[in-house]
């Protein structure tokens, strides 16, 4: 079985990777300057010309791009080539404001699918596998990205898209899917549904899952691995930089290798914009190195993570990013304390609760209220009110020691919190702060 | 011998008790005794039913738990409950909760007790001339 999809580049030496990056960045900056007036203006304002960029070390001289820029430039402002050269559009869900659309030439699609193929092979995929893609197909990048990658690897591809869980399970069992790709919350839901139908984890043929598009925790990984009987791999990406596959996990499961031949990663201090040294926690910034349709230089992802160049036992040499600690947009500030939904999820799973929860934040009489709705389980259900309240108190205490502030815990009946087939909506913030 | 009480988790929302009771009734089960303990967010419906298995099937989508509780038949007269409670008090048995109901025959009453030491409580009640009921007794007494 192949260990790598593109071994020459995935295991290239640091020097070789740098050489490729340095050659590509000079061309990419020149290309953007010549073709994208919006970014040319930003460079002109900063007094930077393409001649100033001779290697990746000079990337720090370039201006940042933010999601606000992408919205302002909507739809064509950051387009890098004639529309006639583009073959596809993808778009963000637009839940946090105006949609962002990204354009792809055939070259862009090819390199994106290569990245997804690398992820599938890293998860043990080959042409022997049956790959069930239950990310949404359509404007969302998840479905087409993994679908294309699965084709490149030569897997038998099941283009299920998301939803219709009964049919997902029927195809999974009847056609013997060995790899599943979806959001982690949907994977957890499929696991739950399988158990409900009386299937044991060993009844399915799945061996690996590739999960991404929303934050998830190590605890949730263990939960999914147990319920589906698989090894669960993380995959990272965002529509702005093509889609899933910008970075992916190998069997070591200690962070995701960034495809450095296509994307240059920096970690910056989100407040000052200053580049931070390797190993420090900060905001992840990506520069595309060889995109045509939608090349982005120094795009601020708002994801908070750490980069590491520690050698990896899988043999891949590309830098690894940690699982994002949270998106700076996911982060809630409640009574002055920073709270990430991922921390709440970790506590719930540690305390034996299912990873289905909803956080409601509101402001009453100038004080933030913080409520977590949690599904109780038959194991903890008791006929005694005092037992139930003791359970709530224990959970509240665990939350307080993790978060620094104590939420109100509300136990609700099992399966009453809405399940998600795409990205789960975990937080309802009713405060009118903007 | 202890009897089986079923507890069901009820979300604190209008209609949940009604829906739960309707599901049990539609299954042809008679609820012979019930009490609801409520908190801010949820209620615990505790009941003695004529058919445990049918009830569990009818409430498949609800969390249901079986608990052994003690049921004692007594005379529906002043002081009858006091006598039972005194027996338990004397032996230091702690009562978690209790609910009582009158029987289908005039002069009959029943009390359901959830205690910390079920076996011990049964023993001392029997010793003091107040035998506890079994699931079979419940069927006989209550399914008339």
Image (cartoon, coloured by chain):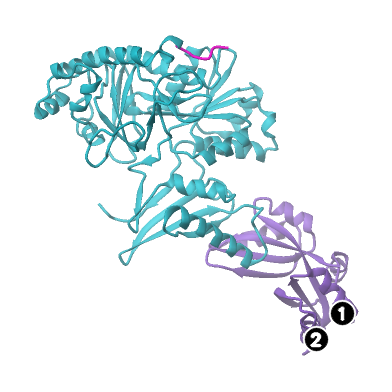
Other residues around mark 1 within 10 Å, as few (<14) / some (14–19) / many (≥20) = some
Q: Which residue is drawn at 36% across and 44% down?
A: A330
Q: Does the magenta stretch include residue B85?
A: no
Relative image position of residue A172 (x, y in whole percent): 62, 26
Q: Which mark is residue B130?
A: 1
Other residues around mark 2 within 10 Å, as few (<14) / some (14–19) / many (≥20) = some
Q: Do the residues labelled 2 and 1 touch (CB within 8 Å)?
A: yes
Q: Which badge, 2 or 1, comes first in the chain's sequence?
A: 2
Q: Is residue A105 visible?
A: yes
Q: What stretch is highlighted in magenta?
A: A1-6
CA gap, disc 2 and disc 1? 9 Å
Q: Is residue A121 above or below residue A400?
A: above
Mark 2 secondary-structure assignment: helix
**Between residues B86 and B60, which one lies in front from this camera angle?**
B86
Q: Say which chain is purple.
A: B
> How many numbered discs sit on the rendered protein?
2
Q: Which quarter of the figure has residue B144?
A: bottom right
Q: Which residue is drawn at 63% across and 31% down?
A: A229
Colour of chain A in the rendered structure image: cyan
Tell which residue pokes out farthest to the top in this image.
A8
What is the magenta segment's predominant secondary structure?
A: loop
Q: In this view, does B112 lie above or below A381?
A: below
Q: Which mark is residue B83?
A: 2
Looking at the image, residue B53 sits to the left or right of residue A162; the answer is right
**Between residues A416 and A305, which one lies in front from this camera angle?**
A305
Looking at the image, residue A142 sits to the left or right of residue A16; the answer is right
Q: Residue at x 66, y 39 (%)?
A: A195
Q: Mark 2 lies on which chain?
A: B
């Amino acid at each position: 079985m192949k260990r790598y999809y593109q071994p020459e580049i995935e295991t290239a030496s640091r020097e070789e990777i740098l050489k490729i990056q340095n050659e590509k960045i000079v061309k990419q900056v020149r290309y953007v300057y010549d073709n994208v007036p919006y970014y040319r203006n930003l460079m002109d304002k900063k007094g930077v010309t393409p001649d100033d960029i001779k290697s990746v070390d000079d990337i720090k001289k370039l201006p940042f791009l933010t999601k606000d820029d992408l919205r302002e430039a909507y739809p064509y402002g950051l387009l890098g080539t004639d529309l006639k050269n583009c073959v596809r559009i993808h778009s963000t869900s637009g839940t946090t404001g105006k949609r962002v659309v990204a354009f792809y030439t055939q070259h862009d699609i090819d390199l994106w699918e290569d990245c997804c193929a690398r992820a599938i092979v890293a998860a043990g995929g080959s042409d022997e596998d049956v790959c069930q893609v239950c990310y949404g197909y359509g404007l969302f990048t998840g479905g087409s990205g993994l679908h294309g990658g699965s084709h490149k690897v030569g897997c038998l591809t099941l283009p299920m898209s998301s939803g219709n869980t009964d049919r997902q399970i029927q195809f999974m069992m009847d056609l013997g899917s060995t790899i599943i790709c979806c959001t982690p919350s949907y994977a957890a839901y499929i696991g739950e549904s399988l158990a409900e139908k009386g299937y044991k984890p060993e009844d399915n043929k799945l061996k690996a899952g590739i999960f991404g598009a929303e934050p998830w925790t190590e605890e949730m990984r263990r939960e999914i691995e147990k319920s589906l009987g698989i090894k669960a791999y993380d995959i990272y990406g965002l529509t702005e930089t093509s889609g899933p596959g910008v970075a992916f996990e190998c069997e070591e499961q200690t962070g995701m290798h960034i495809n450095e031949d296509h994307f240059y990663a920096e970690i910056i201090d989100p407040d000052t914009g200053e580049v931070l040294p390797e190993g420090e926690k900060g905001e992840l910034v990506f520069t595309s190195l060889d995109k045509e349709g939608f090349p982005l230089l120094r795009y601020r992802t708002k994801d908070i993570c750490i980069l590491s160049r520690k050698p990896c036992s899988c043999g891949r040499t590309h830098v690894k990013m940690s699982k994002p600690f949270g998106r700076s947009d996911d982060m809630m500030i409640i009574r002055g304390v920073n709270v990430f939904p991922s921390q709440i999820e970790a506590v719930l799973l540690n305390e034996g609760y299912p990873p289905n929860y909803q956080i409601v934040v509101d402001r009453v009489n100038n004080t933030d209220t913080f409520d977590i709705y949690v599904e109780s389980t038959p194991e903890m259900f008791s006929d005694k009110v005092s037992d139930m309240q003791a359970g709530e108190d224990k959970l509240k205490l665990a939350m307080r020691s993790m978060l620094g502030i104590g939420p109100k815990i509300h136990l609700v009946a099992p399966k009453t919190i809405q399940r998600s087939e795409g990205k789960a909506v975990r937080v309802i913030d009713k405060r009118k702060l903007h | 011998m202890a009897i089986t009480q079923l507890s069901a988790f009820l979300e604190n929302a209008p209609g949940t008790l009604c829906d739960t009771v309707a599901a049990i009734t539609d299954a042809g089960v008679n609820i012979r005794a019930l009490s609801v303990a409520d908190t801010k967010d949820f209620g615990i419906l505790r009941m003695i039913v004529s058919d445990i298995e049918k009830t569990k099937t009818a409430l498949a989508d609800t969390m249901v738990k079986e608990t052994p509780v003690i049921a004692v038949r007594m005379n529906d007269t002043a002081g009858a409950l006091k006598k039972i409670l005194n027996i338990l008090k004397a032996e230091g048995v702690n009562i978690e909760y209790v609910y009582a109901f009158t029987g289908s025959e005039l002069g009959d009453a029943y009390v359901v007790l959830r205690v910390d030491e079920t076996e011990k409580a049964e023993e001392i009640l029997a010793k003091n001339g107040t035998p506890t009921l079994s699931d079979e007794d419940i069927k006989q007494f209550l399914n008339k």
